[in-house]
Amino acid sequence: MKEKPQIKAYKLDMTSGSIFGKLVRFSVPLVLSSLLQLLFNAADIVVVGRFAGDNSLAAVGSTSSLINLMVNLFVGLSIGANVVAANFFGANKIRELKITIHTAMLLSFYSGLVLTILGVFGAKHILYLMKAPEEVLGLELFIYRFILQE
């Protein structure tokens, strides 16, 4: 009779042994996600700069810091939720772990809704508070018309 193939488990026990290698293995996905975010921003700048003009390039540049703030805020919140979930998992408190996971998922969903509404209706005001150039603020209406025509 054939033996079942062993499934390789990807577990990282950070409670014993040397911490350096485990910390590197833990942080590599975080570093790679930040690198992907930077490459996405660079691709935006290259494409917009080549095909859309100077004002559009300024618009992308003025919003990138706000987008990075939001992305890093929610990465931090997700790491915090991960710590709480890991504590409950380690203590074998399954009920509290389920509550933590559901709370984190609901927080993500509702935060996404709030940020969508805030972005659609408050983008111009936020850019004004960030002291974006007047030429850039006028592009917001152009973008909304373009999206609504699609």
Image: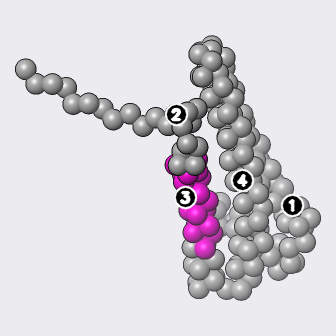
Report the amino acid beneath label 2. Answer: Asp
Query: Where 148 falls versus 3 (above or below)?
Result: below
In front: mark 1 or mark 3? 3
Mark number, residue 32: 3
Residue 120 falls in which quadrant of the image? bottom right
Asked if disc 4 and disc 3 are in contact, CB closer than 8 Å, the reply is no
Q: Which of marks 1 and 2 is nearer the N terminus?
A: 2
Is residue 31 inside the magenta stretch?
yes
Give the residue at x 71% y 72%: 60
Q: Earlier in the sequence, mark 1 or mark 3?
A: 3
Residue 101 rendering spot, x and y as whole percentages: 63, 27
Q: Left of 67 or right of it: where is 52? A: left
Tell me if residue 54 can be seen.
yes
Q: Mark 4 points at which residue?
A: 72
Q: Name the residue under label 1.
A: 126
Q: Which of marks 4 and 1 is nearer the N terminus?
A: 4
Residue 93 rendering spot, x and y as whole percentages: 62, 15
Give the residue at x 71% y 63%: 144
Is residue 125 inside the magenta stretch?
no
Report the amino acid beneath label 1. Answer: Ile
Q: How far apart are marks 4 and 1 (CA)?
A: 18 Å
Dot 4: element: helix
Mark number, residue 148: none
